[in-house]
Amino acid sequence: MTTQHRLRTAPRQVRIIGGQWKRTPLPVPDVAGLRPTPDRVRETLFNWLQHLRPDVPTLSGLDLFAGTGALGFELASRGARSVLLVESNPQALQSLRATRERLAAAAVEVRPGDGLSVAAVLPPGSFDVIFLDPPFEAGLQGPALAAARRLLAAGGLLYLEAPTVLAPEQARQAGLEIVRSGRAGQVSFHLLRQPSA
């Protein structure tokens, strides 16, 4: 599917599924390559997270390629203590800041910059949940996994969206193991963690 086709079929908004901002619409800026995580996929992901990490109020989250902010705002809506959204596109960044202000989302920080560059200066082991949804065409999956692995706290979980299924061997090469995975349309999604000792 081409970028142009995805843009034509992309929704103009998505909604937060659960928590204090349930049913709140989030705008989808008209940005090339922006693919908001579908509601059905987010619902599945957050069911997984609720089962594996029910201690949401203690969690710190990171979304390295925030886009609409749907994943990060969803985590904050459910009570996470802090969420960092990183975005390089000026239009998407402006939309994230406007949403943060509209929701008075004190636990959410919006930081401008390239995801990998920002990841390089963040302290190791500082996030319990990390969302990775890099642009599919950019070939960032491997570098993003490596960067995020360093930032994952003990017992933390890492979510990856990709155009193809992540093989267990690919996960192992990144120092991770696949906990859950699924596919919806053109998107494969995976929940990963550091292997048990």
Image (spheres, rainbow, N blue to C red):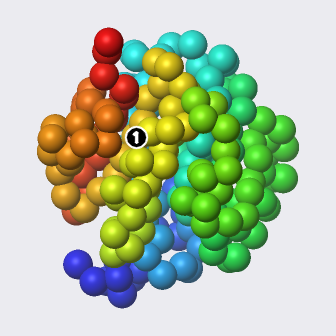
Give residue 59's quadrant in the image.
Answer: top right
Task: Determine the residue positioned at 34% across, 52% down.
Answer: 161
Identify the element where label 1 is drawn: strand
Q: Which residue is mark 1?
A: 159
Which residue occupies the foreground of this view, 171 or 81? Answer: 171
Given residues 42 and 170, the one toward you in this image is 170
Task: Pinpoint residue 138: horizontal percent, then vertical percent.
Answer: 38, 73
- Tell me if 153 is positioned left or right of 143 in this view: right
Badge 1 crowding class, 10 Å Cα cut-off, few under 14, some 14 to 19, many 20 or more, is many
Residue at 60%, 51% (x, y): give it: 119
Q: Where is residue 32 shown, x and y percent of the image?
A: 48, 81
Q: Is residue 106 left or right of residue 174?
A: right
Residue 112 left/right relative to 49: right
Give x and y (percent) for residue 34: 47, 71
Q: Which quadrant holds residue 43? A: top left
**Residue type, label 1:** Tyr
Where is the C terminus found, in terms of image quarters?
top left
For the residue pair 87 and 194, the one nearer the viewer reads as: 194
